[in-house]
Image (cartoon, rainbow, N blue to C red):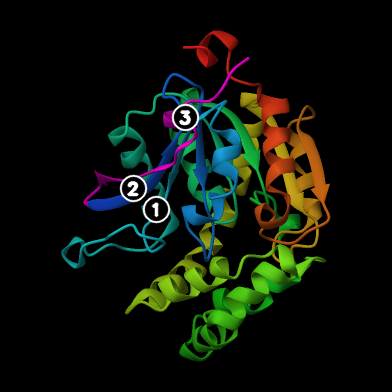
Amino acid sequence: MHFPSSNITTTHYKFADADGVRVFYREAGEPSFPTLLLLHGFPSSSHQFRNLIPLLADNFHIIAPDLPGFGFTEVPAERNYTYTFDALAHTLGEFVNAVGLESYAMYVFDYGAPTGLRLALKHPERVTGLVTQNGNAYLEGLGDAWAPIRAYWETPSAENRNAIADAILHLAGTKWQYEHGVHALESIAPESYTLDALLMDRPGNKDIQLDLFLDYANNLTLYPAFQEYFRTSKLPILAIWGKNDPFFIPPGAEAFKRDNPNAIVELLDTGHFALETHAEHIANRIIEVFGAAPEELLIN
């Protein structure tokens, strides 16, 4: 019988210098275990994985960074950082090198998908599997909630920019993203959306988010490249989505099977932040699909 030691189950909170950025990240599990790189989305941070990490740390080496502009990652003003998804992916690549990851599966959610998939295109030999939880790579996966952002893409005026800020970039907008499509609202921890909103309210951060909303249109132009990667790599894929997500809708999950017939698609009766309500189930499915750590590693 295996009793996890404290160094496996404890989450450690660290920083790594990469690309002129001080990247905050969470780490758990033995480094000898297969690595799982957790990539968060808007408007959250690695904090969204707080419940998942302990559930996986007996089987995986977990690394969960905060992307620039999110969480506790620090971007010096003199860095003159340009907030685009290309830039986020470049910093992520430098971070992966800085912490010495040579092989990893990825869990991508929301913004984590276009960021992590750029990294996969650059280093396909490193990626061993993909868990996509409402992490989109198909046009049909974009829901009606994108309408105001699409208007901003078409006409990037101050009026459209301000309309998005007024609609989304505040506590009520963040809370709505957590609660929409969730039946048992008591399962949503209030610190989740409150922390996200407080961090987003830091000076200058709303402009960062609006810049990323505008740049998101460039992700759509990469969808064909992502899809070709799925076809050619035959990467093991678990697409496990909250089916009530207004941003990334079920056809986006189902589309993975078009390019990879072996992809496993599962729709959960929850919203955008599926880990708030289904963390244990998602953890079990990841272990079932990608395997537990070898027995000889667990007893060392």
Observer-nearest of 188 and 64? 188
Bounds of the magenta span? 1-20
- Name the residue located 80 percent from the left edge and 62 percent from the top edge: 244
Task: Give the Cα separation between the discs numbered 1 and 3.
Answer: 29 Å
Q: Is residue 127 above or below residue 270?
A: above
- Disc 1 marks a residue whose amino acid type is Leu
In the rendering, at what x and y percent does residue 85 appear? 44, 56
> Mark 1 touching mark 2, by CB under 8 A?
yes
Regarding residue 221, the answer to whether it shows in the image is yes
Label 3 SS: helix
Task: Give the Cα separation between the discs numbered 1 and 2.
Answer: 5 Å
Q: Residues within 10 Å of mark 3 (few under 14, many from 20)?
A: many
In the rendering, at what x and y percent does residue 74 appear? 28, 59
Mark closest to the chain's N terminus, 2 or 3: 3
Label 1 SS: helix
Q: Is 19 contained in the magenta span?
A: yes
Q: Which mark, by number, is residue 91?
A: 2
> Mark 2 touching mark 3, by CB under 8 A?
no
62 horizontally vs 174: left or right = left
Q: Which mark, by number, is residue 8?
A: 3
163 horizontally vs 126: left or right = right
Please name the residue that numbered disc 1 is placed on: 88
Observer-nearest of 83 and 196? 196
Task: Give the Cα separation between the discs numbered 2 and 3.
Answer: 27 Å
Q: Residues within 10 Å of mark 2 (few under 14, many from 20)?
A: many
- Disc 2 marks a residue whose amino acid type is Thr
- Disc 3 marks a residue whose amino acid type is Ile
User: For the residues carrying marks 2 and 3, which lies nearer the camera in this image?
Assistant: 3
Q: Residues within 10 Å of mark 1 (few under 14, many from 20)?
A: many
